[in-house]
Each structure stands twice: as C-alpha cells, then as structure tokens.
Amino acid sequence: MHILVLNSGSSSIKFSIFETATPAVGLSDPRSVFDGEVSGIGSANARLTFAATGANPSHSQVKADSIAEAIQQVFAEIGGFALPPIEAVGYRVVHPGPKVDDHRRITPELLADLEEAVPFAPLHNLQALAVIRQGLERFPSVPHYACFDTVFHRSMPREATTYALPKEYSEQGVRRYGFHGLSCEWIVRQLRSQDGGVPKRTVIAHLGSGCSVTALVDGHSVDTTMGMTPTGGVVMGTRPGDLDPGLILYLLRQQNEQGEDAVSAIESILNHQSGMVALSGMPNDVRAMRKAAAAGDERALLALKVFTRALTKAIGGFCWLMGGLDAIALTGGIGEHDADTRREVLAGLQELGIAIDASSNQTGVSGMRKINQPESRFSVLVIPAQEDRMIAVHVDRMAKSNA
C-alpha cells in the first residue's frame, strides 16, 4: 500500500509517501519513497524542498501565502513525479478535543467533532482542517485518516490530567491532554526493537520548535509537561511554557487598557512572540543563538540557560515521580542535533548518577545511539523523531482493518 502523510505546522507542511508491506511479507516499518516540505508559509521566503528516497533534495522558492496555497504546491509536486498511485492519506492533527480518543478514519461526523474542538487548539486545528479538506478534494476515491498527538497519553492517571478548577470546566473537556504523542510512540516502538526492550522507567524529551518531556512506565505515558494545549510545559522556541495564571490576567488587563482584541493579542504573544525568541531577541534558531552566546551576547546566553534549566527540572521531577530512572531518550531537531543542549541539560542530573560520554555526545552519526558511559546508572539515547512514519503505521493498520 502507498500512503501519503500530510503533517501541517504553524508555518510549514511536511509531506511523505510511504510504502507498506502486504500482510504476507510481515510487520516491517513503512518504507519512505518520497519526502518534502513547504516551509515559510505566509512569508516572502516560502520554499519547497523535496527528494525521492536516496536522491539529493531539490529546493525552490514558491508562492505560499496561505495553507491552501501551500497544499496546492504539495499536490502539484506529487503529481509531477512518476509515483505509484496513492491508496490512503494520513494527517497529523494536534488536538481532537474531548470526544475523540483514538486515531480514526475521516468521516463527516469526525470532521464535525474536529470543528467543535477548534477552541482547544485554534492555531493548529484550523490549519489541519484546511489541509484535510484539500486532501479530500484531491483524492476523493481513497480512505483518509486522522492521527492525533493526544492518543498516546490516554494512559495518564486522572491525577495527572485533572486541573484544580471547578467541576463544570472538567465536564467541558478542560484537562491535560499531552502532545508529541506520535513522536513518543515512535520512540517506544524503536526501543521495543532493541535487546532488552523498553526500559521500565523512561523519560522522553522531544526538543524541537515545540518541546515537551514525557514520563513513561513500561512504555506507557504517566505524565507529561504539556497540558490542555501545546503552549504549556517547558520553555520552547516561541512559546513560554508554564506561566503564573495571574500573569495571564495581567496581560489581559494591559491589552484591554490599550483597546486591543485582548484574546487574539495574547494568543499571538504566547504562541509566536514568547519563549527563546523573546529572551534572545533572535529568530527561532538554537544554532544561531549558540553562536551569538559564544560571541558574548548576554540575551542569547540567558535564553539558552532558561531553556536548558526548564528541561533539567522537568526530567529531574519525573525521575522522582517514578522513583528512579532507567533511560532518557532525546529526540526532535534540537534533541538529535544539538550536543551542547544535551550536555547542559544532563549536567544538571549528575547527582542522579548520569555519566555522559563526551565523544559519543558530539558525534554526528545518524540513527539511534547511546551517549552514556558504561558506568552510568541509566541509559541516555538519541533517537531520530519520525512522527510521519508512525502515522503511516497507524494508517496501514486502520486501512487493512477496514478492508
């Protein structure tokens, strides 16, 4: 089966085509045959990057002032290659709301539920819905499936998901959902394939533009840093992480005094103008911040210290919650590629018995690898994030089940 996976972000759309094995062949992971991305959506620098598996990527500037224009660029690119026909389409959807608790085939009823869930994650869900509608129109004769970041965290106990708010709000679906679940699930899948399987007590740190830390027992989520939306938790690229609720009230009063649309203004502040970009005064690029900090830029240095401190606190807190730790897995663009972030975060955990191998931490080797010394009390692994491949796994399962 050939599966198209569409993964839309705030300013980009990633697209991949995977080939899955027939039931007679076995249960191997889907094989990527084509990857691409439209980045910089809404800016004058929108770019299209694509490559067939094993080929050098191609780059070109495109016009993509909106998600609708970007997805048309994607479909035009797919149609320009002699690719096998698409037999199913899968989408990453950040937040399904309180009514949906599993990955689903897309139906009119599911679309209605996702429309109803927009207030839970308006910036993410509106874009996902736009992409889904375009996909349904472009591929009307194949099944379409939505995969949700929250599903992996269904195993969290009520004491981890419940906010200390009046009951009427929890009845409306206000609770901690958790995100980056598809990334976490891929990490667990990779750990299961190794000798020894999944460590009993594991922390996964997904570090990219958005960041979260998740605690797992026997491969199941028991707590995570993100809450009802992907805005909370640890400090991120453009998001502040957890804040004093009174600070939100302060911001609301300020916007009201200025005659602004307070909710929209604060939503923009919290999702696009906060986090490390606010602290550093720089674009959302950790590599550039590290260069600036090394050159003496105090704002960039502070941003990095605030970021890594928040991660150390989260990992250390989950270690105590679980009564110890057997493994840490680092993933996402920063987790995979920034050795300095790994070193600084883990240095704060030395009292727990961690011992990092400096040479292994610095290596540019791709794929899953250990970076701890043999005498370390627990394993530290770097594992590439492959959310799109995890979506293909679910779509393949659902499509074959429906068939």
Image (cartoon, rainbow, N blue to C red):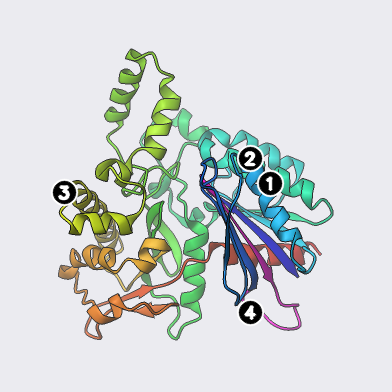
> Which is nearer the N-term, disc 4 or disc 3?
4
The residue labelled by disc 1 is: 132
- Give the CA separation, mark 3 to mark 1: 44 Å
Amino acid type assigned to the residue bearing label 3 in the image: Glu
Query: What residue appears at the point 49 percent right and 75 percent down from the top-left corner?
Result: 190
Amino acid type assigned to the residue bearing label 4 in the image: Ser
The residue labelled by disc 3 is: 298
> Which is nearer the N-term, disc 3 or disc 1?
1
Task: Please indicate whether residue 17 sits to the left or right of residue 215 in the image.
Answer: right
Mark 3 or mark 1, which is nearer to you?
Answer: 3
- Give the CA separation, mark 2 to mark 1: 11 Å
Q: Position of residue 283 (x, y in %)?
A: 35, 47
Q: Position of residue 146 (x, y in %)?
A: 65, 52
State whether residue 145 appears in this view: no
Tell me the quarter of the image containing the N terminus.
bottom right
The residue labelled by disc 2 is: 114
- Give the CA separation, mark 2 to mark 3: 43 Å
The residue labelled by disc 4 is: 28
- Give the CA separation, mark 1 to mark 4: 27 Å
Mark 2 or mark 3, which is nearer to you?
Answer: 3
Amino acid type assigned to the residue bearing label 1 in the image: Ile
Amino acid type assigned to the residue bearing label 2 in the image: Leu
Describe the element under mark 3 as helix, strand or loop: helix
